[in-house]
Amino acid sequence: MNTNQIVPEMPVVCSQGGQFATVDHLEGDNCIKLNKDENGQHHYIPTSWVTNIENGKVIVDRPGEQAMEDWSETPTH
């Protein structure tokens, strides 16, 4: 998969089809920085979670609730 296709403002969608975040930008080759949440906090997810990039959306391998439990507040390099 070509992570260069991941661009700012793309929706991040869980394995169940629901959007749980939006891309801020790709940080390095292995990390996606997400836009700030309602508390003003950025979160990071590894690109290894991404299963597909389709229809302008980043699809990850886990349910949204699990993704939000597993994401990091610091880059995952």
Image: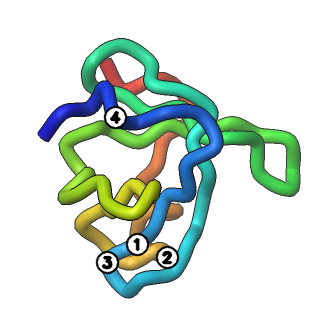
Neighbour class for label 4 at 10 Å: few (<14), some, many (≥20)? some
Compared across the picture, whether 15 is left or right of 23 comes to left
Which mark is drawn over residue 5? 4
- Report the residue marked by disc 3: 15
Neighbour class for label 3 at 10 Å: few (<14), some, many (≥20)? some
Q: Position of residue 2 (x, y in %)?
A: 18, 33
Front label number (1 vs 2): 1
Say which residue appears at 49% left-offset and 40% top-offset.
72
Quadrant of res 45: top left
- Report the residue marked by disc 2: 65
Task: Give the secondary structure at mark 1.
Answer: loop
Say which residue appears at 45% left-offset and 55% top-offset.
56
The amino acid at mark 3 is Ser
Task: Give the secondary structure at mark 2.
Answer: helix
In the rendered picture of this protein, how many numbered marks are placed on residues? 4
The amino acid at mark 1 is Cys
